[in-house]
Amino acid sequence: MSTIFSRWFRGSHLLKFRILAVGCLGLSMLYNMNLGYADASRVDADSSSQGKPKVVVIIDDFGNGQKGTEEMFQMPVKLTVAIMPFLPTSHRDAELAHKRGYDVIVHMPMEAKTGKSNWLGPGAITSDLSDSEVRKKVEAAIDDIPYAIGMNNHMGSKITGDKRIMSIVLAICEERGLFFVDSKTNYHSIVGQLAIQKGMPPVTNHIFLDDAHTTSHISKQLQEVELYATKNRYCVTIGHVSAAGKKTAETLRTRIPQMQSSVEFVGISDLVREEWGWNPPPMLPSNNR
Ligand SMILES: [Zn+2]
């Protein structure tokens, strides 16, 4: 996975974020024109699919106007959008997702085992940070993403194996009523084990949809998702808005109606509530505690 993110961030490092911020107003007007449907329509649960295996589709890397963003907001089922903090479209994407009835989670940038730190994006957690610096960054990220009900990791193959840092991250998530979804960029991640110890949902990604940028691969991965959900009652899968984001959106849109005969598409909030009884009190901004 780190290769994909590396490629993405080579073209989207901090300087570019500043340039994008300047163009934010114009982009925002464009989105308002293109995404008028977000006000008009809202995805609802399909009452006919009760009892079917559940599929959660998380789409990572929102917040920076990546390719496929617009198409993802037109998906006919409830998606979970993972939005990176402090980027030009972070707030707008959260608002649109909320209006559309999608779940919103914070896509927290975390240091990988390989790659440069400026590929991570602003506000990233790196292994050189002190306990209090980690806390400050995680709280600031949560405060930056309206409607967030959970968090997952952007990159993070190094940090998700770091017990000191992940203990702090999970403690803050718990305080704020958020669960943490392990994106599984590290096979040796300790996040699931820590979540179980804290009585939080040990929810994890099972299958990456678009780790290869071809329609045939994405389609094959969706077949795997359907199979996994059928065998295990549910499946969490992660795709991206990215260079291949339009392909991911197009393939999803084509396959969803076929898949709905055997699975139900739900948000991550529905899964953690039904599987782990996760029903936390409403979240407050950290400056409001
Ligand atoms: Zn990411």
Image (tube, grey):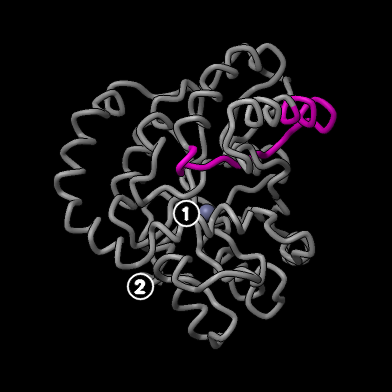
Percent coordinates x, y for residue 62 in the rendering: 42, 47
Residue for point 69% across, 58% down: 200
Task: Between label 2 and label 1, give the one nearer the viewer.
Answer: 1
Disc number for residue 28 = none
Q: At which x and y percent is residue 52?
A: 72, 20
Q: Position of residue 65 (x, y in %)?
A: 33, 46
Q: Residue drawn at (34%, 67%), measured in percent from left and top?
A: 14
Q: Is residue 289 left or right of residue 265?
A: left
Which residue position holds label 2? 287
Q: Quadrant of residue 128?
A: bottom right
Instruction: Determine if the C-beta at disc 1 is less than 8 A from ligand 1.
Output: yes
Q: Magenta region: which residues?
A: 224-244
**Which image quarter is the N terminus in?**
bottom right
Q: Does residue 9 lie above or below 65 as drawn?
A: below
Q: Is residue 125 left or right of residue 286?
A: right
Instruction: Say which residue label 1 marks.
Output: 8
